[in-house]
Image (spheres, grey):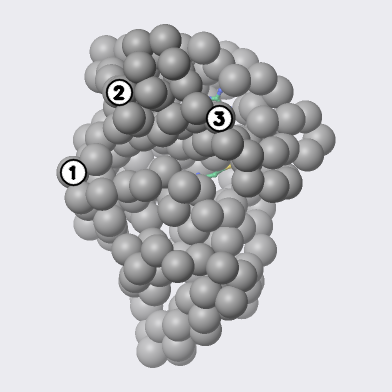
């Protein structure tokens, strides 16, 4: 579990790449500059950790591309103290970005293998989510709702209604919607029944699957 000057230098260059691609939120850029992404991947893959690419992790899943993590976090409009629900804990990298910004994070993962691995791993780096849940993100987390923000890190074939229902008024759901390609979509809750919808281009994610495994 080493983080060397070489890794730090590579991260600085990654941050520059993200800035060139249009990421401007300094909280997000600072978080990416700080978090040792190579430790969220299996040790053989250190050379890949600081290029702007998704990468395989356990259980046929991927750690999202840094640009995607940065863009989704920026769209979520996270502030210190924001109560955030993440669907798709995976490696825990996105979770760490949210925690680094000072959010209170609840995160759901449907793959038991990944859930167990990440639950042990995050505290080793000092990252303490409010709760990690082994479950199905399609139903959200009613017991802790409402949330300031909900971020879905897998491609959703449709927008799950419970996620919209679990937003505070003014809260945002950031969700990639589609089958083989997804459109990054942001819903902002404007009233008990009203939502604004905005779209932010094409992305590719592993699928959001029903039930847990
Ligand atoms: N945020 C992660 C991205 C992992 S890829 C990271 O930064 O590493 C998407 C993750 O969503 C996978 O781990 C997958 O198992 C999980 N997932 C897919 N469908 C889900 C569902 N219905 N509920 C919870 N997690 C789900």
Quarter the C terminus occupies: top right
Q: Relative to residue 122, is residue 88 drawn left or right?
A: right
Q: Earlier in the sequence, mark 1 or mark 3?
A: 1
**What is the spatial separation of the Cα atoms under label 3 and label 2, in whole angstroms?**
15 Å
Give the residue at x 44% y 30%.
Answer: 188
Circle 1 Cα neighbour tier, 10 Å, few/some/many (<14 / 14–19 / ≥20): few
Write down which quadrant ligand 1 falls in: top right
Q: Relative to residue 48, is residue 126 drawn left or right?
A: left
Callout in the foreground (1, 3): 3
Q: Is residue 83 in view from this perspective? A: yes
Local SS, label 1 = loop
Q: Do the residues labelled 1 and 3 touch (CB within 8 Å)?
A: no
Q: Relative to residue 153, is residue 105 drawn left or right?
A: left
Q: Does the residue labelled 3 lie within 8 Å of ligand 1?
A: no
Residue where numbered disc 1 is placed: 81
Circle 3 Cα neighbour tier, 10 Å, few/some/many (<14 / 14–19 / ≥20): few
Residue where numbered disc 3 is placed: 197
Residue where numbered disc 2 is placed: 168
Q: Which of marks 2 and 1 is nearer the N terminus?
A: 1
Q: Does the residue labelled 2 lie within 8 Å of ligand 1?
A: no
């Amino acid at each position: 579990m080493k983080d060397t000057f070489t890794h730090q230098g590579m991260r600085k260059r990654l941050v520059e790449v993200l800035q060139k691609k249009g990421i401007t939120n300094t909280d997000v850029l600072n978080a990416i500059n700080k978090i040792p992404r190579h430790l969220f991947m299996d040790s053989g893959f250190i050379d890949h950790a600081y290029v702007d690419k998704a990468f395989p992790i356990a259980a046929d899943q991927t750690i999202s591309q840094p640009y995607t993590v940065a863009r989704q976090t920026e769209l979520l409009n996270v502030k210190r103290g924001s109560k955030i629900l993440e669907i798709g804990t995976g490696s825990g990298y996105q979770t760490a970005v949210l925690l680094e910004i000072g959010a209170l994070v609840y995160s759901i993962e449907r793959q038991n293998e990944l859930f167990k691995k990440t639950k042990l791993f995050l505290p080793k780096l000092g990252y303490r989510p409010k709760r990690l849940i082994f479950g199905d993100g399609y139903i959200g987390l009613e017991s802790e709702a409402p949330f300031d923000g909900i971020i879905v890190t897998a491609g959703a074939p449709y927008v799950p209604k419970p996620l919209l229902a679990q937003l505070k008024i003014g809260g945002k759901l950031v969700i990639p919607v589609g089958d083989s390609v997804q459109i990054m979509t942001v819903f902002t809750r404007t009233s008990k029944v009203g939502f604004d919808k905005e779209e932010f281009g094409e992305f590719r994610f592993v699928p959001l699957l029903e039930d847990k495994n």
